[in-house]
Image (tube, helix red, strand yellow):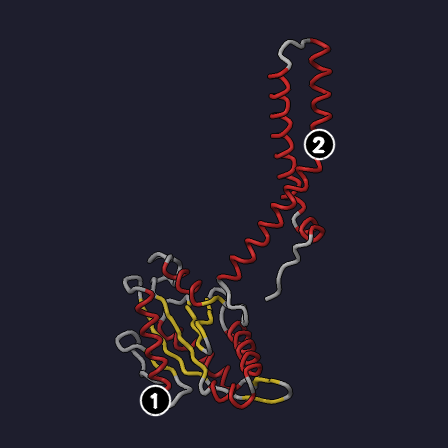
Amino acid sequence: MTYPDLSFLSVLRNRTRPIVVRSLLLLVAIVIFAQGVNAYFTPDLAGAERIANVLLCLKITSIVAVPFVFYVVLLQARADLAAEFFRLLSRTDALTGLLNRRAFVELHRSAGADDGFGETGSRALLVIDLDHFKQVNDRFGHDAGDAILMQLADLFRINLRSDDIVARMGGEEFAVALRCGAEDEALYVAQRLRHAVERNVFLFENQEIRLTVSIGLVCYDGDTRFESALRQADLLTYKSKKDGRNRISCGEGHLALPNAA
């Protein structure tokens, strides 16, 4: 993830409209305040003297306030941009650009029962773990491991729909929330991801590396807590590893399908 350009010229170029609007509003507020103070200290003036005094106050206020207002608003825009970036950074995995675990859990914890997850309100959750990833780090180094994780994140983006949500949960573990209402559709997506990883050739410094994934799949409805579904999917991922890796384990009672595919 690249840091935003917080130079004044860059901020001015990219946020011109809000800067101009804020500057005008603040300038108007300062002018009104200055005229109010001026009227308070010069209550006896009337006619042409009053008009001349108002115009003089307006001129002085404009000369002093315009550069000050513009600079203050520019600083505020710069601070807003930085705050926006760091909010994004706190919710994003820096290596892959995917959501991190905290953002993924909070997103689903705050979602209501009727949040658009399929026509029937049912949802599917995948927990995906790379097989033998430690061996990759031991053999090729951690730089190779990082390169593979970034390539894997891109592979997930390519093979998932735009409304599916994928996150890196930590290490070599990922999670995917599927917006689907059919159980067989969830298994189809899980199989597609497994096949995509199995057939993909990961590259690092002209070295070809092949990997597989173990997947735990849980389908649940609005009555099930997301954290419970996540724990179950995580346990099913370990079941896939125990049963031989490169497979999908499904929650009993949730899918009318074999536990391993």
- The N terminus lies in quadrant: bottom right
Q: Which numbered marker is on residue 64?
A: 2
40 vs 192: above or below: above
| Image point (54%, 68%), residue name | 94
- In the image, residue 59 lies at what x, y percent? 73, 25
- In the image, residue 89 lies at what x, y percent? 53, 62
Tell whether label 1 touches label 2 (CB within 8 Å). Answer: no
| Image point (47%, 86%), residue name | 134
The residue where tag 1 is placed is 243
Q: Quadrant of residue 261?
A: bottom left
Q: Which numbered marker is on residue 11?
A: none
Q: Nearer the viewer, residue 49 or 25?
A: 49
Going from the N terminus, do you reach mark 2 or mark 1 first? Answer: 2
> Given the image, on which type of amino acid does mark 2 rest?
Val
Q: Quadrant of residue 124?
A: bottom left
- In the image, residue 202 lies at what x, y percent? 57, 84
- In the image, residue 64 lies at what x, y percent? 71, 32
| Image point (40%, 67%), residue name | 180
10 Å crowding of disc 2: few (<14), some (14-19), many (20+): few
| Image point (50%, 87%), residue name | 211
Q: Which secondary structure, mark 1?
A: loop
